[in-house]
Image (tube, helix red, strand yellow):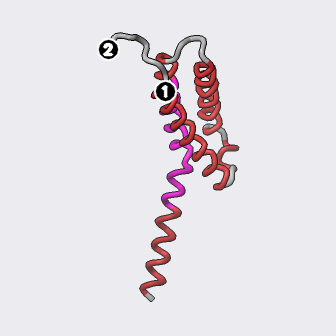
Amino acid sequence: MFGWIKGKMDNAKERIRIAKEINPRTFRDMAREITALADACSQVCSPESELLQRVEKIKGEMDQLTELTHQPEFKKLSVQRKMELRQSLIQSREQILESMQAAPSPTKLIQ
C-alpha cells in the first residue's frame, strides 16, 4: 500500500520537474543566457574569425526562439520535442563556453 503511494508521489514529482523544464519561460531564460554568453564571446573573438559568424548566427536563433515561445504553437509542441530543444540549448551553451576558453588572448601582455 505504501509502495503504491510512494510510486504515485515519485511520478508526480517527475511530472512537475519535466513541466518546469519545458515551460516557455525556462526556454526564454536559457535563450537570454546564451545570448549574453554569445555577446561576451563576440567581444573576445577576432572580427574575421568563423567563430564570430557562428556566434552571430546563434544570437539570431536565440531571438527567433524567444519569439517562438510567445506563440501559441509552442505550447502545442510535444514534450519530446521540447526536451530535445532544451538539450540542444544546453549543448549550444557548452559550445560557446568552450569557444570562449579556446579563443586567443586579446593581448600578449600578462596582466
Q: Dot 1: within a 10 Å radius of its alpha carbon, few (fewer than 14), some, or many (20 or more) residues? A: few
Report if residue 43 lies within the magenta region.
no
Residue name at image x 60 percent, y 11 percent: 48
Look at the image and tell me whether residue 36 can be seen: no
In the image, residue 78 above or below residue 67: below
Q: Residue at x 43, y 17 (%)?
A: 105
Residue 19, percent from left and from top = 53, 55
Mark 1 secondary-structure assignment: helix
Q: Which quadrant of the rendered structure holds the C terminus?
A: top left
Principal secondary structure, stretch drawn in magenta: helix
Out of 74 and 62, give the one closest to the viewer.
Answer: 62
Name the quadrant containing residue 62: top right
Q: Which residue is mark 1?
A: 102
Residue span colored magenta: 16-38
Please name the residue shown 61% across and 28% down the image.
Answer: 58
> Magenta span has 26?
yes
Secondary element at image label 2: loop
Please identify the quadrant where the N terminus is shown.
bottom left
- Mark 2, residues whose alpha carbon is within 10 Å: few (<14), some, or many (≥20)? few
Label annotation for residue 110: 2
Residue type for callout 2 = Ile
* Cα gap from disc 2 to disc 1, whole angstroms: 17 Å
Q: Position of residue 40 (x, y in %)?
A: 46, 22
Q: Earlier in the sequence, mark 2 or mark 1?
A: 1
Q: Is residue 58 above or below residue 85?
A: above
Residue 97 visible at all: yes
Relative depth, front residue between 64 and 73: 64
Query: Would residue 77 be found to the left or right of residue 88 on screen?
Result: right
